[in-house]
Amino acid sequence: MSSSPSLEVPPISPTPTELRQPLSYRVADKVVGTLFSIDPIFNVLAKKARESIIARGEKIGVSWSERVEGLKRHKAELETEYEGVYRKRVVIPEYYQKPFHAYKEGNLGWAPAIEFEAASLSVHAPTYTGGPTELEEDGDAKLRGNFHKRMKEMLAKYSFVPSRIVDVGCAAGMSTFCLQASFPKAEVLGVDLSPYMLAVAKYNLNTRPELAQVKREGRVDYVHAAGEDLGLPDASVDLVSICLVNHELPNEAARAVFREAHRVLRPGGALAFMDMDPTVPAFQRIVKNPMLFALFKSTEPWLKEYVVLDLPSELARAGFSHMDVRGNSPRHRTVVAFK
């Protein structure tokens, strides 16, 4: 088995200045940040979080050993996919080099990529239930399905049917395959900064029986690129979709992604994204608890910036209009805006 290809990670721009918060939040941030900066403590907390996700998944029938260990047994094929998708010229932004989701390597490693699908199914199991101990095996499918349902409702107001779609931040391809299922005649291009995630996405596309027809028709492809620099021609795309990505972006990066989406969209094209809704009661309960918010933020380093982002103003500044927002879970919203 060959060794994992090395990934060059040069710095790009400085981390944005921290947003001001009341003393209680700054103290909680300091305490949690200090704890997570100590490797032995971080490793223990990350292990416990991972064990909790695995246990939750097993309760809803997601076999960690089947899904994760199964992929690990095909590491050679995954590395071949990596070598095919990795672009050395892609500059990895500094914000993307931080730990995400209790992975020290963030998204830039095999573990987060190989575990992505199983973890998503587990994490989203309580999305539509009354609490974290009440689980649904189809929570993730319902969340993504409602995103597409709301998106298609808003697009239908303008008789809008896309033929070319870009899936920004596609990770291991779950969002890309959903887009292809919702718009079966469209071409879908998945874009991500992590070549590890893309390698898993391409492997799934090439090997899963349920995706054989999609593979044969060549309607799904992947490219290693940043959402801020897609490398596509101006006005060449009908729909830009961003699924559960915005909360992982600092505000400057979010603005750049909005501008880039506007650039590649054809006149009348649409930007659609789904993410957490900071305004709903379920999320506000977390925001109003300094320690709980700090713990949440420890796995989502840019959450604080996402919470205060003035979305209507930022989309308008990027050139978008006719913004529509609809809830699609107790904690998530779907947003569509047109060029």
Image (cartoon, rainbow, N blue to C red):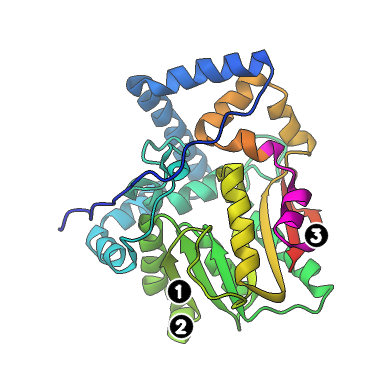
Sequence order check, earlier mark of 1 and 3:
1
**Few, some or many residues within 10 Å of mark 2 (<14, 14–19, 20+):** few
| Range covered by the magenta-colored residues | 307-321
Q: Which residue is mark 3?
A: 323
| Residue 221: mark | 1
Q: Is residue 113 magenta?
A: no
Residue lying furthest left in this view?
A: 1
Label 1, secondary structure: give it. strand
Q: Is residue 19 visible?
A: yes
Up-down: is 30 above or below 193? above
Up-down: is 311 above or below 173? above
Sequence order check, earlier mark of 2 and 3:
2
Residue lying furthest bottom in this view?
A: 217
In space, the residues marked 1 and 3 are separated at their CA atoms by 29 Å
Instruction: Judge from the rendering whether residue 85 lies leftward or rightward of residue 229; answer left or right.
Output: left
In space, the residues marked 2 and 3 are separated at their CA atoms by 32 Å
Q: Which residue is mark 2?
A: 218
Q: Residue at x 29, y 50 (%)?
A: 8
In space, the residues marked 2 and 1 are separated at their CA atoms by 7 Å
Query: Residue flagged by tag 2: what amino acid is it?
Result: Gly
